[in-house]
Image (cartoon, rainbow, N blue to C red):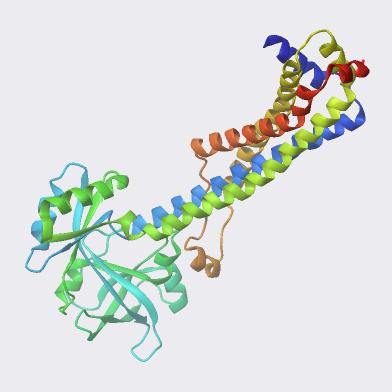
Amino acid sequence: MRVTWLLASRFLRRRSSPLLAASSRAALAAVAFGVAALVVVLALMSGYRLALTQGILAASGHVLVLPAAGESEQELARVLSGHEGVAATGKSIFLPGLLATSPQAQGEVITLKATELLPPFVGELDANAVGPLPVAVGEGLALKLKVKVGDTVFLQLAQPSGRLAYTPARVAAVFATGFAELRESWLFCRFSDLVRRGGNWGTALVEVYLHDPNDANAFAEQWERRLGARAVFRSWSEMNRELFVALRWQKITLALVLSLIVGVGAFEVASALVVLIAEKRRELGILLAMGASPFFVRRAVVLAGGLLGLSGVVAGTAFGLALVAVLDTLGVPRFSSELASIYMVNRIPWQVRLGDVLWVMAAGSAEVFLASMAAAWPLARRQPAEVLRWV
């Protein structure tokens, strides 16, 4: 094996013709750019999933619990809060409606969340037993309505009975978050403030926040078996399953499509090997005439192609990681408010996952070695008489 490595390295290091040098450089660049494209795209897709996950978890608890008729939300929250792994529990109500600057003005479609556990980006809202309902308004929604802290707005909320409730509200805070839907169409208020103002808002949900959001599915299944028909449990990942399945398939599809670019680079390596075999046929013929087996020579040529391709894989991985670091430092990609409403986030962070990088390197290496074997395979089928004519 050491002789094979020596022979392969001499094939690549020895002075060669301009044609072989140019084809080798082209093969190296093609593999490197293909691998770099794969690294960048997978880091972008992983970051997009991370941004969506953070936005979803910022809007609600990790597990939502709907009590059955006659069950006490307070009792359920007390029972669940004693479970190991639970960080906090609280009651919440989600209400669709309209928000306007006056009763006669055209309103914006919103979702009001009245909760005992306000999100960190909202902060604390001053309790107000009388007067307009104190609410926190998203930055994008505040810009659309041209309102600021201290202004009075008017809420038109849909009750479970189908009747509409008109409630004056005061902008107590304007929050900013990277999740576009929260910025553009969500309001937050304290659960107790909404309840004190009356109205039939239906059964409240119990939100459960866990120390590890990834335990939400197991937690929901465990407590659903334990409580039976007393409550319905839904984890955040279950409620957004279609979104994350679509993202996973999009990532797989992009990875497979871009791996074809690496395949093109791999066949550039095969082309370089064909040129190498043509230029080194005298040396190869001498080796075969001296008793080297065709498989030994083929293995040396495949190894030469593998070393050339692996150099491209390593260079492309390094270039892709450097490009990701630069783009992350610059804060791109960042979207305008119109595009953010489509992609649901204002900015996509970059997330490099070790598993993705290892997959890219393994896939690139496999394609390079397969192409090298295809180029070197005819060497193993040469007849002795033909080999002697090479010398």
Labels in figure, total = 0
Q: Image check: 203 left or right of 254? A: left
Q: Nearer the viewer, residue 297 or 325?
A: 297
Q: Quadrant of the C terminus?
A: top right
Where on the picture, by quarter, is residue 136? bottom left
Where on the picture, by quarter, is residue 380? top right
Q: Image check: 219 left or right of 59? A: left
> Which x, y percent locates residue 49?
46, 52
Residue 315 visible (yes or no): no
When the figure is inspected, residue 120 is found, relative to residue 376, above or below; the finding is below
Q: Nearer the viewer, residue 153 or 91?
A: 91
Residue at point 42% right, 66% down?
181
* Outermost residue, top side: 290
Where on the picture, by quarter, is residue 274? top right
> Which x, y percent locates residue 374?
72, 32
Q: Quadrant of the N terminus?
A: top right
When the figure is inspected, residue 47 is found, relative to residue 229, above or below; the finding is above
When the figure is inspected, residue 372 is found, relative to residue 173, above or below; the finding is above
Q: Image check: 40 left or right of 108? A: right
Q: Image check: 158 left or right of 361? A: left
When the figure is inspected, residue 308 is found, relative to residue 347, above or below; the finding is above
Residue 11 visible (yes or no): yes
Residue at point 90% right, 18% down?
282
* Outermost residue, bottom side: 104
Q: Nearer the viewer, residue 162 or 68?
A: 68
> Which x, y percent locates residue 329?
58, 45
> Which x, y percent locates residue 149?
37, 71
